[in-house]
Image (cartoon, rainbow, N blue to C red):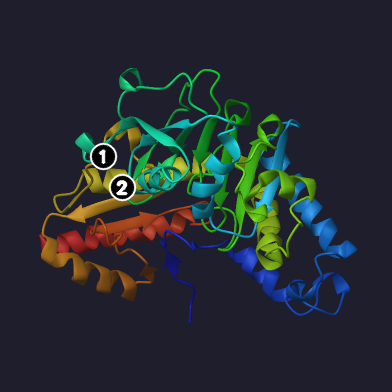
């Protein structure tokens, strides 16, 4: 069967050359006569791989030396709890920006550990926009300010880094990490699952300013202590070795494409094409504020909802898969992370126009 164009929100599509390299090395990695999945994590070959992935991450994202890079065997959801456990540092309050479903999950979890101040909420905007920063109610004594850079379900993306003064800024970048250059110095901590732009499920990336480590809540489990993982170079427990290996291949692929500047240009071009198709249509629509439309996860709807099932069936027959909208929102959703080739977006747009012509 030919490869399809996979618009899944995650696990998401991977670069084909990464998959081919993994396939070629599956049974015999680095001439060891075994798979990377069989190599002990306390051996020199794996420790060297881990160090290389860390170095590539620092290079691609331009991470300063005063930040620690961690790769942990968990999902980004685990950090909803790990962040307050590690960053409250004697304080009792934290600010959260509520801009959609994922930020709501993060703030609800944080309520188990501290007093959460919802500094801004997009609820009265139907989560189709981000409240103007002038309206935010930030607490000067907050331990940190948390936000979700891209709400994959609602299709809302911050196109700016919030100004929060000296309070550490924490970002869930699961769906935007590696999609464009970012100024790491503006953040206290960044976390992200790797299953969208960086690899496969089961692994998360943390980039944390070193001076914020080492002051966890007393009851924090050992495996939820960022300092423990930093002290052990992300090898305190058995790592998700295959996921780390795939992330290393993806980072190398990103560098070959021209780095994050090239990724940003590609992602902008792909999203502009699809939004133009939607906006010029009589059948499709997207309700997100133009200023905050996501570049990488684009939900849209059919004005005739009864056509949705037919749309998905015919799209699947054309090799365009995983376009069904999230169960909480419905409609259609096209997630177009780094590895989605521009040809895939072009084919989706061609199909959308043909479908509209046949049904309007």
Q: Which residue in the protein does label 2 denote?
A: 154
Q: Is residue 2 above or below residue 61?
A: below
Q: Do the numbered discs 2 and 1 sit on residues whose CB atoms are within 8 Å?
A: yes
Q: Which residue in the protein does label 1 denote?
A: 128
Q: In this view, does 274 lie to the left or right of 227?
A: left
Give me the C-alpha separation between circle 2 and circle 1: 7 Å
Q: How crowded is mark 2: few (under 14 residues within 10 Å), some or many (20 or more)?
A: many
Q: Position of residue 134 (x, y in %)?
A: 33, 17
Residue for point 67% across, 53% down? 222
Q: Position of residue 345 (x, y in %)?
A: 40, 55
Q: Can residue 61 be seen in this view?
A: yes
Residue for point 29% across, 60% down? 325
Q: Where is residue 124 in the image (x, y as percent from the top left)?
A: 20, 35
Q: Where is residue 287 in the image (x, y as percent from the top left)?
A: 21, 42
Q: In this view, does 188 lie above or below 306?
A: above
Residue for point 70% across, 53% down? 252
Between disc 2 and disc 1, whose residue precedes?
1
The local secondary structure at tag 2 comes to loop
Between 298 and 311, the one lying in front of the other is 298
The C terminus sits in image quarter: bottom left
The answer to which image quadrant residue 100 occupies is top left
What mark, if any, has residue 341 been given in the picture? none
């Amino acid at each position: 069967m030919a490869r399809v164009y996979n618009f899944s929100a995650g696990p998401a599509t991977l670069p084909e050359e990464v998959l081919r390299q993994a396939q070629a090395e599956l049974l015999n990695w680095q001439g060891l006569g075994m798979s990377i999945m069989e190599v002990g994590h306390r051996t020199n070959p794996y420790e060297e791989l881990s160090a290389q992935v860390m170095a590539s991450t620092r290079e691609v994202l331009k991470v300063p030396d005063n930040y620690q890079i961690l790769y942990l065997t968990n999902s980004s959801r685990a950090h909803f709890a790990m962040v307050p456990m590690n960053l409250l540092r004697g304080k009792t309050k934290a600010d959260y920006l509520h801009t959609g479903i994922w930020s709501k999950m993060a703030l609800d979890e944080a309520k188990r550990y501290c007093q959460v101040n919802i500094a801004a909420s997009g609820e009265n905007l139907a989560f189709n926009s981000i409240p103007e920063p002038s309206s935010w109610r930030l607490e000067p004594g907050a331990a940190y300010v948390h936000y979700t850079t891209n709400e994959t379900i609602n299709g809302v993306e911050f196109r700016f880094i919030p100004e929060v003064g000296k309070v550490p800024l924490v970002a869930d970048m699961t769906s935007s990490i590696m999609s464009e250059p970012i100024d790491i110095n503006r953040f206290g901590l960044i976390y992200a699952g790797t299953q969208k732009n960086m690899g496969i499920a089961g692994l998360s990336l943390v980039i944390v300013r070193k001076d914020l480590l080492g002051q966890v809540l007393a009851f924090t489990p050992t495996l939820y202590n960022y300092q423990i993982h930093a002290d052990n170079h992300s090898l305190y427990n058995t790592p998700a070795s295959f996921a780390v290996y795939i992330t290393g291949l993806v980072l190398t692929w990103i560098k070959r494409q021209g780095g994050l500047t090239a990724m940003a240009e590609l992602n902008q071009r792909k999203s502009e094409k699809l939004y133009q198709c939607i906006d010029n249509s009589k059948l499709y629509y997207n309700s997100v504020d133009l200023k905050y439309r996501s570049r990488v996860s684009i939900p849209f709807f059919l004005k005739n909802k009864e056509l949705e099932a037919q749309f998905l069936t015919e799209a699947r027959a054309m090799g365009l898969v995983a376009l069904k909208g999230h169960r909480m929102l419905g409609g259609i959703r096209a997630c177009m992370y780094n590895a989605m080739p521009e040809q895939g977006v072009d084919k989706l747009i061609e199909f959308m126009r043909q479908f509209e012509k046949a049904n309007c």
